[in-house]
Image (cartoon, helix red, strand yellow):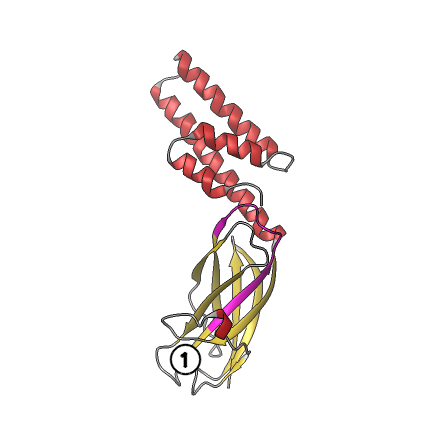
Amino acid sequence: MLIDIDLIKSHVINGKIDLALTELCEGTKSTTFEIDSIVIAANYNKWKQEKKLGIIDERQEQLIYNKVIISIIELLNEITTKFLHNELKYKEVRFFETTMENLTLRENRIYSKSFDHKTTKHIGWELLINSPRLKVDLNNYVKWYIDLPSGETTPKYSTEFRFTQGWSNPWVAGSWGKKSYDQLDIGCYTIYFEIQGKQVIEEQFFLE
């Protein structure tokens, strides 16, 4: 990803639309989003000119300005979704025992797909991702839920992640479980992960 999504959103929030559009147009050059960026910039420049000449009233001025803002945010979301769906490969999910309060440090994790239900109360998961080396920071979140042995399904949870510039093959981690031992049912648990509304991977672990 070459475009700095967070920087552009920050410009928009702070009312620096010219800077936001400059970054957007520069970042989308020679991509499928280049024309969309040019159209948004053209609409904004037209709005500025009409405002300067006084040929639109205050209500029209606000409506057009809001439309430009919404168009920028929607395009940024499209760019992010395409990157997360098409340029990242969701390689593997690994499981490990952890506490509810803090995830086990990565260097101390013992990975397995099978756990003793009498001595396990919290299962950590680690989602491994293959990606090109990132040119900018990327902030987003993964949604996940678990099919339980009972046939029930947990609510959907969200785990935020931040991939920093220069990082390749990142990972995301989280956990699920109970407060006390011997509360997890014996059987197969299937965990599903979604990114931007699309399921990207699923995996199973077992309590015996």
Q: Which of 65 and 163 is in front in this view?
A: 163
Q: Residue at x 52, y 74 (%)?
A: 95
Q: How many marks?
A: 1
Q: Where is residue 119 in the image (x, y as percent from the top left)?
A: 43, 86
Q: Which of 32 and 156 is in front in this view?
A: 32
Is 67 magenta? The answer is no
Q: Where is residue 137 in the image (x, y as percent from the top left)?
A: 50, 48
Q: Which of 60 and 178 is in front in this view?
A: 178
Q: Where is 110 relative to 195, above or below?
A: below
Q: Which of 50 and 114 is in front in this view?
A: 114
Is residue 55 in view from this perspective? no
Q: Where is residue 180 in the image (x, y as percent from the top left)?
A: 35, 81
Tell me the quadrant of the picture where the N terminus can be found.
top right
Is 128 magenta? The answer is yes
Amino acid tagged 1? Lys
- Position of 163 with respect to 15 (left or right) is right
For the record, the magenta segment spans 124-139
Q: Where is residue 85 in the image (x, y as percent from the top left)?
A: 59, 52
Q: Mark 1 points at which residue?
A: 121
Task: Find residue 90 and report its image quarter.
Answer: bottom right
Report helix, strand or loop for mark 1. loop
Q: Which residue is drawn at 59% across and 55% down?
A: 168
Task: Find residue 158 and report its image quarter.
Answer: bottom left
Is residue 38 in view from this perspective? yes
Q: Where is 88 relative to 97, above or below?
A: above
Q: Where is 207 relative to 198, above or below?
A: below
Near mark 1 (Cα within 10 A), the count class, few <14, some 14-19 or many ≥20, is many
